[in-house]
Image (cartoon, grey):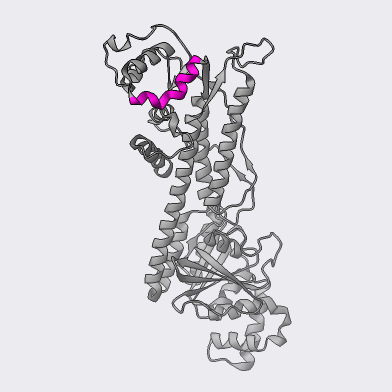
Amino acid sequence: MSSNKQNNSDFNYPSNSKAAINVGVVGHTNAGKTSLIRTLLRDDHFGNVDDAAGTTRSVEQSAIYADNEVVLNLFDTPGFEDSSALLIALDDLSISIKPNSPTELLKAFIDQQGRYADFKQEIKVLRQSLSSDVLLYIIDVREPLLGKYRDEVEILSKAGKPILPVFNFIADENQALNRWRDQMALFNLHAALEFDTVAFDFEAEKRLYQKLQSLMERHYDPLQRLIDYRQQVWQNLNQAAAQRIFILICDVACYRLEATASQSSQSKTIGGNGFSDTDVNKMQAFVRNAEQQALTDLLAIFSFTQLDIDLQQLPVSEGRWELDIFSPHMLKEFGLGIGASALSGAAVGVGVDLMVGGMSLGAASLLGAAIGGGWATARRYQQEFKAVWRRHQWLCVDDDTVSLLYLRQCRLLSTLSHRGHAAQNKLKLVDNGKVGLPQKWPSLLKSLRQNPQWHQATPDDAEYHKSQKLMLEWLLLGN
């Protein structure tokens, strides 16, 4: 989506396609110019971002592509530091040279830069403004309306280029935003944009390109290609993230640990059920590692680094299904009818805590039916059959934990998709109460439980793809 960072302490002459739009990103120091470009490029390494004034000291270039076509050349510029003094210097020069136009005045000022050592950084901004096709004037709306900002707009207007004010850091700043809108209207800059570089909104990025379309009619078509391309890329990112979350939930819900009931009086057990805490700890470690791997992948999908993330430890505990030994669902799964003749080889009433496809059956009844019928379906559960004779049982992750894992991934997806690449705070998941379990969650979870063979696999199975499609719809479109 972006590439070609290029530094030039004086000036960046366009080196890409002639059709590319050269965009000068200008404004006061620390208004968020570099932050805007970072967010557009999905690159938190572009330039330098710091609270100190004058962090950007040179013009830095990068490009935004639509497929292989360069559509926008972005030029990050130093911030204005003393626009009022600069405007006075320009007015004095205008009296002495009597230029034919404001643009001619700026060129004359640049040509005589040796006389204006105090405006070394501002001259870089003026030079880039003259070379650009359009200017994005970045405004930190939290700042008071001071005369220096009005002077900046007056100076930039002398370049004779379209100016699009971009209001940054707008979260919870409605009154300040309205004041800045009114101020820009006094300069006849009615086409403005709200774009928070920290709390990212993809729709705001689309509106940026649409605003440029309205200001630059002859570039309408390449900008539309850029809008369509970025829209598709954004959808693909979210689709990939949702698929990764489904893989995580599927792996955890389908995970089972074969455990032998402890017979030693010295062995630690969980809840008095005879399962060693070693087995349960192993299961917990699996879930934690699975979630951490998914987190790493999701950060990479959205082009973030491995930041510290505040995650509570999952309350993973053992889970077993203790259903009726003659579950109608399992009878149907093995192709059995209601009649008892098919179960003639079964020793009815032998209860063994064996989880098979999400349900617990008596071992003898299960084996009697399978051996008597000889169904191919039974081969799918041959490991479970072996476990019966060894008097083993299965531990699995309980429903509450899987549900919690899903809800946490929902919040993580929302957090990452609304996080600008200029954000400096640590990534945190906040329970805003807006995400709940979908209505059909129990049925989806049951489907996952009944298909343990899906664990760490991507089967060509209609039911698997149906479950995947359903969860992706929840994640991408809401419950």
Position above or below: 101 against 225: below
Residue 158 visible? The answer is no
| Residue drawn where x is 56% and y is 76% of the image | 156
Task: Between residue 360 and residue 127, name the one nearer to us.
Answer: 360
Please state the horizontal and vertical placement of residue 64, each as a whole percent of the image.
Answer: 50, 67
Q: Quadrant of residue 146?
A: bottom right
Q: In the image, is 278 to the left or to the right of 185?
A: right
Quadrant of residue 332 within the rendered picture: top left
Magenta span of residues: 376-389
Q: Residue at x 69, y 67 (%)?
A: 54
Q: Please tell me whether residue 384 belongs to the stretch shown in magenta.
A: yes
Does the magenta-highlighted stretch encompass residue 396?
A: no
Residue 231 vertical position relative to residue 260 in the rendered view, above or below? below
Please state the horizontal and vertical placement of residue 264, each as a whole percent of the image: 65, 11
Image quadrant for the C terminus?
top left
Q: Nearer the viewer, residue 260 or 360?
A: 260
Q: Which of these two is toward me, 331 or 437? A: 331
Q: Please name whichever residue, 435 or 65, is drawn nearer the observer in this view of the structure.
A: 65
